[in-house]
Structure formats: C-alpha cells, structure tokens
Image (cartoon, rainbow, N blue to C red):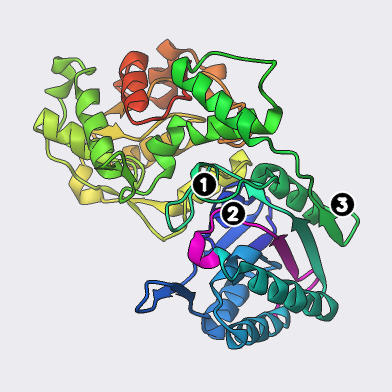
C-alpha cells in the first residue's frame, strides 16, 4: 500500500470544501472536521470555535502534514473575538505540523451567501484579508486567491450558488480547477506562494447547457458549450449524486433520498427472475451504500433484510480513492462479517453500482470465508460502461472495459448477477431532475 500524504480539512460541510474533499481524497489521506454551527434567536448562524484538543488529537493520531481550509469558514464569525480565537487555534495547530503547514483558499465573493451575510460582507472580507495577511507572515502557508467559484455542491443552507436568483451573479472560476491548482501546488508543480485564479466562468453558457440537457441529455451544442460550463452543468445533473453521494436525509423534490433509494430497490426486484428470488434466505447490503436499496428489495421480495456485513470503523467511503491498491486495502480494513448469521445461507448481495468492482469483489470474498451457501448480486443501477468525462469519478478503468457482461458471474464467483435496466434507471433519474447518465450508456 502506498503511503499517502495526510491532510486535515476544516469546515468540511461548507460548499467549497465538500467538493474539495471529494477530489483531494483521490490522492491524499483525508481527515475531515465539520463546522459546529449554532443559531441565535434571530436565526443567524454562528461558527463555534472547536476545542484545540480535537484538532491536536487528529493531527497526532493521523500524522497530519497539512491543514486545508477556505475563507467560507470565516464567514460565520460575528466579531473580532471570533477571529482572534480562530487564529490562536491556527497558531497552536502549526506547532504540530511540519513543513508547509497551511493551504488557505481565499474566496473574495462566495456566491452562496444570503442577504443577511451580504449586508456586512465587505466588513468581514476586510477582516479576513487583514487577519490572513498576518497569518501568512507568521506561518509557512500557501495561499490561493480567487474572486469567486462555481460548483455543483450545495451549501449547508441548501443554496446552490448558480441557482440562487436573488444575488448578483459574479464572475469566477470552476471549483474543480481551483482544487487542481491546490493539488499541483502540493505536488510542487506550482512555485509561487500566492496563486491567483482566472474569472472565466460564463453563467449564461452554463444555464444554456442545462436547458439542453433538459430537452435531451445526449444533445451537444459545441458552439455554446465551454469546458468548465459543460462540466459543472453535467455535475449538477449527475445521476451518481442521487445514486451515491447524497445523504439519505436530504430532500429531492419533496422526497427524501432514502425513500427514492427504497423505491429503486423495489423496482430492481422486478428485474430478477422469480426462481432466483425463491432461493434467497437473506438480503444483505454492502454498507452503507447498499442499505436502502436492499431494504426496498427485501420488502418487495418478502425476504428478511440482514445487515450482516458491517463497517469496522467510521472510515469514510472508498469511491473517491484513486489508487487501486490503496482502495482495496481501505475496503479490507473497513468491512467485517457476522459469521454465525450467514453460514450455509443463500445471500442476495446489494450495492448501489459496479464501477471498478473492488468493493463487491472483497465483499464476496468475505462472505465465502464464512461459508455461505451461494451468493447472488443485485445492482439497482445499470452496467457502468465508461469513465466519467465530467470529473464526478476518479480517472480509473471501469470493470466493464475488460470484463464482458456475460463473464461477470464468473469474475465475482457468484450464482448470478443482475442489474437495473437502463430504461428504468433513466426514467427514475429524469423524474427527479438528474439527467446525466452518460457513464451508463
């Protein structure tokens, strides 16, 4: 297993850092600490400064080499005391991290601000720049300056920057491009201490492309589409967001993500030969991604649902890890099996999709070590045919690129493997507003 540099991301539930974490995780070991937000009597959110021992414990335990945060973190500070407390915390943290200690993303105009922030934002921004300049002089920092950014990721207020119609649209650059610059700077490919971003994102082109996708998700309009605009339009409409990335509690068109995934499991049941369903003793999900699909399937099949594979630690998700060796080691360490429950049983194993097949390959191996009678794999999405062109997956080889559909059963060593039909998947995703299914075509 390759040793990966470790980075602590602070404010991992802010709009920019959500996307940053997804991409940084592909090459680095990531530890994420979310904001602790409290609301006053007027409903105004305030950032609660974490206790120093929370950070120090993570830094020592995981041998953190860098701290990553953005100016969105600072937007929740209400007064000078908040700033002083935060930078005192940064100063303390810097004593425990060697080398280039801090990567700071300074965003002058985050778009996901509502009116109560915008009224006092100029004052806040002056403080941010004043304080961060002091920070730069004190510590070994790499600073990235940007006027604004655009990303598919929603903020903790569930406001998408590109869809927030009541604020002035600002020019900016793609969050993905910003994070690419961060990765290059970590790898030593960017020499300047201060890195400036371009303001080249065209919101009208972006909206035109989303309208075209609404009419026909395969339609291309080369004369209208710019690279960043096309990428973020497809990211915003990406079906993998609903399939995998969204939290079960999030709401899509007045439906929870959990309820949509339950329905996808019920729909999947209709694709499975009834003679196969009759063989199943237990429906078992791959945690946590297969859980709601498996519950829906078990309900429709009238077969017991059993969480017999479990996560051994709260170690996050393997999807965004780029290196296959690192990803396989991560999965092996993460999963455990309830031996006494599964012995001599026929299992219906459910995960949300097959991309590289690494998770399912290891899950099948673990199930066989406890001597299950037979395994069938049920997948609530179609066969993934191609690598995502829009940066929603790491650049890696899909299993379908070198294993034919009719060989998948032998590859996994199971009694059978069944997928959701492309027609059913497309219809369900379109109904909920997710029109990019290109990797499944």
* Proximity of marks 2 and 1: CB atoms separated by less than 8 Å: yes
Q: Secondary structure at mark 2?
A: helix
| Label total for image | 3
Q: Is residue 206 magenta?
A: no
- Return the disc, 3 or 1, that comes first in the chain's sequence: 1
Question: Which quadrant holds residue 219?
Answer: top right
Query: Which residue is found at the position 19% from the left and 35% from the top?
Result: 296
Q: Position of residue 294 (x, y in %)?
A: 24, 37
Report whether 441 appears left or right of 415. right
| Front residue (pair 346, 228) | 228
Residue 37 in the image: above or below residue 186: below
Label 1 packing within 10 angstroms: few (<14), some (14-19), many (20+): many
Q: Which mark is residue 190?
A: 3
Give the magenta-colored segment's residue range. 96-117
The answer to whether residue 63 is visible is yes
Task: Tell which residue pokes out farthest to the right in this image.
Answer: 191
The answer to whether residue 438 is visible is no
Q: Which residue is mark 1?
A: 153
């Amino acid at each position: 297993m390759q040793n990966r540099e470790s980075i602590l991301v602070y404010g991992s539930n802010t709009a920019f850092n959500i996307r940053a974490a997804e991409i940084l995780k592909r090459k680095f070991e990531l530890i994420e600490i979310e904001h602790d937000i409290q609301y006053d009597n007027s409903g105004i959110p305030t950032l609660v400064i974490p206790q120093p021992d929370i950070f120090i414990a993570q830094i020592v335990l995981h041998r953190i080499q860098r701290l990553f945060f953005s100016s969105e973190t600072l937007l929740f500070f209400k007064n000078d005391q908040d700033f002083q407390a935060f930078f005192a915390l940064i100063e303390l943290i810097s004593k425990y991290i060697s080398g280039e200690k801090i990567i700071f993303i300074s965003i002058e105009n985050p778009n996901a601000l509502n009116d109560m922030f915008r009224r006092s934002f100029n004052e806040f921004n002056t403080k941010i720049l004043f304080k961060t300049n002091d920070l730069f002089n004190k510590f070994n920092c790499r600073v990235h300056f940007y006027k604004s950014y655009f990303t598919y990721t929603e903020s903790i207020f569930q406001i998408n920057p590109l869809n927030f119609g009541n604020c002035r649209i600002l020019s900016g650059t793609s969050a993905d491009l910003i994070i690419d610059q961060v990765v290059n700077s970590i790898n030593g490919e960017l020499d300047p201490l201060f890195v400036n971003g371009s303001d080249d994102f065209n919101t009208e082109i972006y909206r035109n492309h989303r309208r075209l996708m609404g009419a026909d998700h395969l339609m291309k309009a080369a004369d209208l589409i710019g690279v960043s605009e096309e990428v973020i339009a497809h990211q915003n409409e990406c079906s993998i967001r609903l399939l995998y990335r969204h939290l079960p509690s999030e709401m899509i068109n007045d439906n929870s993500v959990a309820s949509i995934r339950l329905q996808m499991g019920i729909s999947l049941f209709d694709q499975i030969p009834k003679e196969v369903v009759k063989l199943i003793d237990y429906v078992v999900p791959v945690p946590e991604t297969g859980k709601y699909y498996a519950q829906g399937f078990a309900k429709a099949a009238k077969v017991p649902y059993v969480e017999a594979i479990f996560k051994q630690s709260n170690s996050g998700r393997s999807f965004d890890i780029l290196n296959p060796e690192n990803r396989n080691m991560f999965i092996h360490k993460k999963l455990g099996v309830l031996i006494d429950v599964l012995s001599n049983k026929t299992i219906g194993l459910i995960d949300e999709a097959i991309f590289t097949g690494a998770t399912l390959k290891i899950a099948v191996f673990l199930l066989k070590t406890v001597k299950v009678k037979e395994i069938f794999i049920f997948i609530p999405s179609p066969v993934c045919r191609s690598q995502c062109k829009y940066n929603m997956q790491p650049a890696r080889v899909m299993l379908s690129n070198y294993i034919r559909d009719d060989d998948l059963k032998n590859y996994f060593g199971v009694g059978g493997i069944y997928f959701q039909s492309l027609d059913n998947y497309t219809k369900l995703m379109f109904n909920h507003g997710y029109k990019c299914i290109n990797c499944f075509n």
